[in-house]
């Protein structure tokens, strides 16, 4: 493409510098031309983008008779090319403005684009600095009082790294806790992060894009597409933990109509502080954390919906307001909207169920849950009859949550009981469990990728969720009942227990890490199993490290503060992710 097609030469300063570079400055001319994207190799494999040399371009700086010439890198993207990222990198003088060619988009960056902080950045960094200073004072106070064996003020150690670190890295659990949940939670989180890496790749140029799209639409990628089951597992665990803690304390009548506001307030204090921090990270310093030919564009894709649509994000209804990730603020947090909406309606089941149990009406209590489960299956099936599958909507995901509530009640009622299962029956159930889980994981792709048979798709999705939840129930039951000691030992290991406490922060922070690692690339990516496995391991490691900082700085102190403020009136329960 000719320089005149993207550069506005009517601007005198631009015209002078372009003319000087082309006619008089051979070194700068060669650097700029060399930094331009060329005709890419591998076009028959689907490589339709040549990014050029980003770093070489933005580092051009030379004093000349026509002023200081500095490089500006522009990514020219050809839009409306079906399922393909196409474009090239261009290097022009910084003083030049660009004009938008027909059917193309241009994103330009200079060396100052990611190093110059604005007022929003300074404000947010100041807030983080205040938190860091409070953590320092609280930690010093905690250390000093421990050393001299002085009485501690509970509020003064809320932000102590020592106290919160002990809570985070404590591997001993109480006798009434179910340790295998930690392993299930962590494995599900790893599955989600690994699958999201593939979906973020859709925003990037891929060297073998033709193979990538054929692979993504084939059954070979079922383990990526089926990661939605991990989301259902989280919903199931949410219901399980809530019911287990509620019914375990039913003699205290932990949840009543007057305490419902505290029930909701506790949940909001659990969710909102980390959500708020990650929201402002995306709006401010994320764009300054790295650089690259694609980085600014990827960050803007995340920032723009949060600037325009922040209210549904904080009010937990964006999963119904929007049905595509381009419009949602931090699209992966649609799950939190689903989770909170389910939490809003949970007292309608828990309060009458608790009263029935106090009156020893166990059969009626189970009938109540059975009726709720039946509604959670039939209502979505009727609503979705003959229409496209709605991935984000809460009514399509109620059944795993209800089954979690039921299993939580069952485990409380039978926590001191050991079931003796005949060996043959035990192996048969495990075989059916594994087959069912494989069928759910493998064939769910048909509902999201291959067919437009909405009726059969929705029937399968409607019944696959209870089936998957039933399989998770069996895994938990087997671990608690000590039928599978090896599996229980694996799922209850110390690493999983610690990482389980990080899961909420990991869920929020995963996109920051994915944008940071993948958006910083200087060359088109290659879709191949082993490179992506290596990348996923790095993503999980970095996400875990950042989550430790997040938990020690915000999550753990706020949870402790919420318990202290609401302790007298709140229902005694904490729903963990």
Image: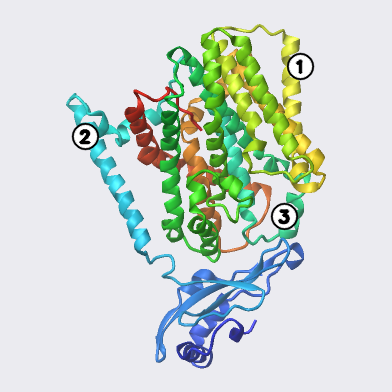
Left or right of 302? Residue 451 is right
Say which residue label 1 marks: 428
Kindly identify the residue that appears in the image at 72 percent across and 20 percent down: 430
Say which residue label 2 marks: 141
Q: Report how far apart the C-alphas of labels 2 and 1 lie in the structure.
A: 58 Å
Total numbered badges shown on the rendered structure: 3
Earlier-in-chain disc, 3 versus 2:
2
Say which residue label 3 marks: 212
Looking at the rendering, which quadrant does residue 389 occupy? top right
Judge whether 426 appears above or below 556 on screen: above
Crowd around label 3: few <14 · some 14–19 · many ≥20 (10 Å): many
Crowd around label 1: few <14 · some 14–19 · many ≥20 (10 Å): few
Kindly identify the residue that appears in the image at 53 percent across and 88 percent down: 9
Q: Position of residue 36 (x, y in %)?
A: 58, 76
Crowd around label 2: few <14 · some 14–19 · many ≥20 (10 Å): some
Q: Secondary structure at mark 1?
A: helix
Earlier-in-chain disc, 2 versus 1:
2
Kindly identify the residue that appears in the image at 67 percent across and 74 percent down: 103
Q: Considering depth in this image, is 187 or 393 the residue closer to the camera?
A: 393
Q: Which mark identifies residue 258?
A: none
Q: Secondary structure at mark 2?
A: helix
Residues at discs 2 and 1 in contact (Cβ within 8 Å): no
Earlier-in-chain disc, 3 versus 1:
3
Q: Report how far apart the C-alphas of labels 3 and 2 lie in the structure.
A: 55 Å
Residues at discs 3 and 1 in contact (Cβ within 8 Å): no
Q: Position of residue 238 (x, y in %)?
A: 55, 29
């Amino acid at each position: 493409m000719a320089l005149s097609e993207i550069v506005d030469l009517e601007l005198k300063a631009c015209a002078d510098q372009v003319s000087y570079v082309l006619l008089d400055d051979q070194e700068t001319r060669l650097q700029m031309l060399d930094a331009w994207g060329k005709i890419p190799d591998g076009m028959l494999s689907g490589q339709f983008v040549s990014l050029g040399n980003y770093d070489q371009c933005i580092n051009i700086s030379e004093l000349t008779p026509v002023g200081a010439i500095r490089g500006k890198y522009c990514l020219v993207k050809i839009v409306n090319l079906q399922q393909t990222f196409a474009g090239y990198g261009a290097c022009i003088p910084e003083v030049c403005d660009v004009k938008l060619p027909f059917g193309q988009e241009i994103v330009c960056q200079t060396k100052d684009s990611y190093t110059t902080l604005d007022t929003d950045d300074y404000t947010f960094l100041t807030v983080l600095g205040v938190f860091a200073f409070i953590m320092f004072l609280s930690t010093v106070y905690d250390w000093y009082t421990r050393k001299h064996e002085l009485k501690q003020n509970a509020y003064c150690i809320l932000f102590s790294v020592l106290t919160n670190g002990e809570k985070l890295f404590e591997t001993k659990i109480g006798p009434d806790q179910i340790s295998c949940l930690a392993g299930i939670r962590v494995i599900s989180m790893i599955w989600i992060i690994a699958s999201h890496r593939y979906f973020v790749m859709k925003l990037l140029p891929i060297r073998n894009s033709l193979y990538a799209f054929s692979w993504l639409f084939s059954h070979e990628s079922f383990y990526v597409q089926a990661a939605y089951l991990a989301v259902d597992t989280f919903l199931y665990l949410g219901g399980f933990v809530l019911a287990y803690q509620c019914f375990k304390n039913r003699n205290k009548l932990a949840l009543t109509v007057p305490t419902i506001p505290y029930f909701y307030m506790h949940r909001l204090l659990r969710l909102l502080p980390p959500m708020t921090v990650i929201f402002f990270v995306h709006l401010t310093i994320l764009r300054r954390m790295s650089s690259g030919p694609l980085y600014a564009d990827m960050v803007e894709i995340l920032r723009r919906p949060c600037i325009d649509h922040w209210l549904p994000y904080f009010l937990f209804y964006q999963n119904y307001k929007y049905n595509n990730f381009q419009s949602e603020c931090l699209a992966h947090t649609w799950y939190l909207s689903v989770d909170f909406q389910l939490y809003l309606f949970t007292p309608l089941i828990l309060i009458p169920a608790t009263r029935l149990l106090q009156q020893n009406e166990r059969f009626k209590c189970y009938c109540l849950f059975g009726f709720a489960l039946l509604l959670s299956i039939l209502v979505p099936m009727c609503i979705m009859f003959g229409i496209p599958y709605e991935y984000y909507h809460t009514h399509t995901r109620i059944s795993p949550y209800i089954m979690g509530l039921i299993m939580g009640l069952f485990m409380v009622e039978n926590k001191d009981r050991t079931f003796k299962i005949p060996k043959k029956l035990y192996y048969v159930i495990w075989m059916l469990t594994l087959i069912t889980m494989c069928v759910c994981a493998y064939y769910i792709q048909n509902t999201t990728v291959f067919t437009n048979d909405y009726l059969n798709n929705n029937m399968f999705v409607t019944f696959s969720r209870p089936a998957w939840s039933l399989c998770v129930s069996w895994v938990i039951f087997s671990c608690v009942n000590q039928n599978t000691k090896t599996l229980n030992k694996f799922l209850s290991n110390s690493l999983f227990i610690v990482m389980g406490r990080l899961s909420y922060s990991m869920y929020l922070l995963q996109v920051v890490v994915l944008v940071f690692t993948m958006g910083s690339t200087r060359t088109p990516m290659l879709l191949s199993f082993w490179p992506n496995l290596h990348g996923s391991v790095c993503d999980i490691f970095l996400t875990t490290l950042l989550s430790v900082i997040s938990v020690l700085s915000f999550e753990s102190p706020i949870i402790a503060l919420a318990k202290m403020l609401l302790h007298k009136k709140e229902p005694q329960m904490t729903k963990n992710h």
